[in-house]
Amino acid sequence: MKTKEVIIEQQKDFIQEMKDKTSAFLNSIDKSEIETILLSGSVSRADFFPRRKDNGEYNGMVDLIVMRKKGSSVTAEDIFGPDQDPPIPYHCIKRDDVWWAILFTDFIDTEKFKQYEEPRKFSILEAQILYDPNESYKNEFEKINQFVKEDLKKNLDGALGYIHYLISNYKKDRWYRRQAFIQMHENLNTAIRAGVRALFYLNGFYSPAEDRAIYYSHSLPKLPENYAELISQACSQITDSEADYFRREKIFMEKIVGFIEKQR
């Protein structure tokens, strides 16, 4: 598997090219109604790894978070022109064969940040400041981080509590008596996803969207020994097998959950 670190090293020149193009693009727009611009997503993480299409375009977008000034009514269309890919839930525009996906929003203060779902919080915290002339966001970010510390502790407690509920004898017994091993496996899958989220919380991060959480979890600094092998063994399953369920549960609870509970 190509880990994030491998991609970062492989793509470093390309990432710099995308950042340079983004800077040039932002220098060309009117920012008089804009307070802050952040670079987020895979270019910010430096693991942007798109496929090149036959027409020369990249099958991927550079993500931006653009915050208008407080009290401003300016729209994304006013600044960037029409949305060129309406089905995508961002304001998407193309310049010189590069696409940008823009989250256009009011200024993100701590109260607004609290309202976001977890993947959005993850993307905001990993973002880099590109434009913040009054340091409005830089100053607000200190307050956001204070909230994050307490929120992650709460999320970790919640994830561990949910895991123990899903793996409890009470929960397993109803399906075991029915020999519904496929449901037991599915409940364990849900617990494993909660365990991956708990690893992010333990490391001081929100969990990214579920479709990328396991992949990015491999790059966390604090992990159980032989984590790549453990998570692979825990996720591998024979869905109608009683024995395989208990094999998976033992690995997950002893090696992964046990590690988290010792480290918290």
Image (cartoon, rainbow, N blue to C red):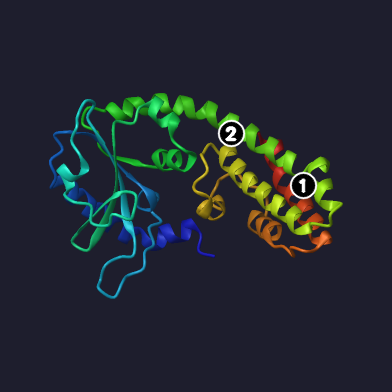
Q: Quadrant of residue 126?
A: top left
**How crowded is the residue under tag 1: few (<14 C-alpha within 10 Å), some, or many (20+)?**
few
Q: Horizontally, is 86 left or right of 231 in the view?
A: left
Q: Residue furthest right?
A: 177
Residue drawn at the location 84% of the way across and 52% of the way down:
176
Q: Residue furthest front?
A: 178
Report the amino acid beneath label 1: Glu
Q: CA distance from mark 1 to mark 2?
A: 21 Å
> Quick check: 154 above or below 252?
above
Q: Horizontally, is 192 left or right of 65 in the view?
A: right
Please tell me the numbered disc located at residue 59: none
Residue drawn at the location 27% of the way across and 57% of the way down:
85
| Sequence order check, earlier mark of 1 and 2 | 2
Report the amino acid beneath label 2: Asn
**x, y percentage for residue 6?**
47, 61
Residue drawn at the location 80% of the way across and 47% of the way down:
172
Q: Secondary structure at mark 1?
A: helix
**How crowded is the residue under tag 2: few (<14 C-alpha within 10 Å), some, or many (20+)?**
some
**x, y percentage for residue 23?**
21, 48
**x, y percentage for residue 45?**
40, 50
Q: Secondary structure at mark 2?
A: helix
Which residue matches tag 2? 155
State which mark lies toward you, 1 or 2. Answer: 2
> Toward the viewer: 227 or 37?
37
> Quick check: 121 above or below 181?
above
Q: Horizontally, is 210 left or right of 8 in the view?
A: right
Which residue matches tag 1? 254
Quadrant where the C terminus lies? top right
- Do the numbered discs 1 and 2 sit on residues whose CB atoms are within 8 Å? no
**x, y percentage for residue 170?**
82, 41
